[in-house]
Image: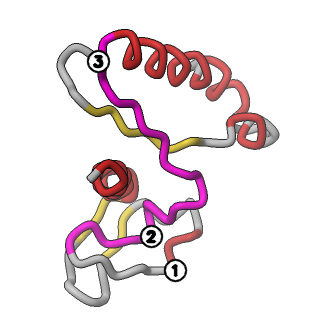
Amino acid sequence: MISENQVIVSEDLQIKNMEKNHQLAKAISDVSWYELTRQLGYKAEWNGRQYIKIDACYASSQICATCGYQNTDIKDLSVREWICPKCRAKHDRDINAAKNILAEGLRQIA
């Protein structure tokens, strides 16, 4: 992943807080999110690449990646898909968030 990209962007998730949710704790621990992000940072530095972490408070899943409208009704994690009331674009919550996280990371280094 590092050798194929100049820039890697991820959200700086609060892993310790997420592990307090007993329904998610095992799944979060199993994927070793902390170790993945630590290795990404290390390998990026080693290979002269940029690894950017976006603040966890950034509303990545609420912002329409098409028009920029912020839909505060999307805070509920059970909402997996939504339609932007402004431009009518249909979004998968996770794909939309990924697009916004990448865009924010690129904006930060521009």
CA separation in Å, label 1 and label 3: 34 Å
51 within the magenta span? yes
Q: Is residue 49 above or below residue 107?
A: above
Task: Work out whether mark 1 precedes mark 3 in sequence or the reverse, and give the earlier one.
Answer: 3
Label 1 vs 2, first from the N-terminus? 2
Nearer-N-terminus badge (3/2): 3
Which residue is situated farthest in the bottom direction here? 86
Amino acid at pointer 3: Ile
Judged by its main secondary structure, the magenta piece is loop
Side of 102 relative to 6 (left or right): right
Q: Which mark is residue 2?
A: 3
| Residue 62, numbered label | 2
Q: Secondary structure at mark 2?
A: loop
**What distance separates the C-alpha of mark 1 from that of mark 2?**
6 Å
Position in image of residue 27 (x %, y %): 62, 27
* Three-letter amino acid code of the residue under disc 1: Thr
